Image (spheres, grey):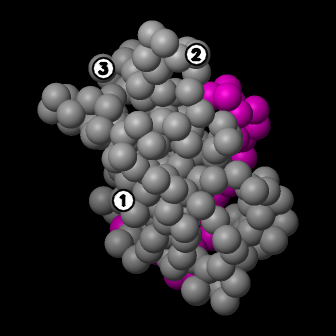
Amino acid sequence: MNKFIAVDFETADYNPNSAVSIGLVKYQNYAALDSFYSLICPPILYIRRDFTDIHGLTVNDVKDAPDFKQLWGNNIFNFIEDYPLAAHNAPFDMGVLKALFFHYNIEIPEIKYFCSLALARKTWPHFSSRALTALAKRFNIKYDAHNALADAQTCGKIIELCAKAAASKNEPEEITVSDLLKKTGLYMKRL
């Protein structure tokens, strides 16, 4: 399998069900095929000031946006199909996703996922930081940090760079995501 969807959420506060935006980028053979971005109206219409300082979103930006339940049923579920998800610091983004499923009483689908941060740590153990912003700077990837769609795109590019670093001279230049995870001692998890 050489396909995945990079996902990123931005939240209103420390509550994992407080998502205010989502970015999804569909990759096949490390090439972006499609993307989806939406603002999300959180269950409580409030955004901490320090969170606005990070992602730039305010209550006025999200007050008329669909809630997650609407987005899941109308857009996200069909976009994901059977693709595994990837996120930079997957425990955070998968925690947001689970919290949203619980909050809106949505049956949790069978979703596989892996963490690009864990992959970067295995690929470049000598780097002082494997944060998305640090990796983007190191590899000259220009992007709008803490914009959910830009973060998802950058996550996908980092996974591609990990794959290139893991490919040996005896292998094809492009290794599958499954082989990449095996080579680094990682594996797909289930939501």
Is 48 situated left or right of 114 in this image? left
Q: CA distance from mark 3 to mark 1?
A: 25 Å
- Front residue of 76/113: it is 113
Nearer to us: label 3 or label 1: 3
Q: Is residue 105 above or below residue 164?
A: below
- The residue that appears at 70% across and 84% down in the rendered structure is 107
- From which residue to which does the magenta span run? 26-48
Amino acid, disc 3: Arg
Q: Which residue is more in the foreground, 86 or 101?
A: 86
Q: Secondary structure at mark 3?
A: helix
Specify the quadrant of the image occupied by residue 168.
Answer: top left
Where does residue 95 sit, x and y in percent of width and height? 45, 71
What amino acid is at disc 2?
Answer: Pro
Tell me where residue 49 appears, x and y as whole percent. 34, 62
Mark 2, other Cα within 10 Å: few <14 / some 14–19 / many ≥20:
few
Q: Residue furthest bottom?
A: 105
Name the residue that disc number 1 marks: 51
What SS does tag 1 mark?
helix
Residue that numbered label 2 is attached to: 172
Spatial distance from mark 1 to mark 2, Cα to Cα? 43 Å
For marks 2 and 3 on the same chain, the one whose residue lies earlier in the sequence: 3
Q: What residue is shown with label 3?
A: 138
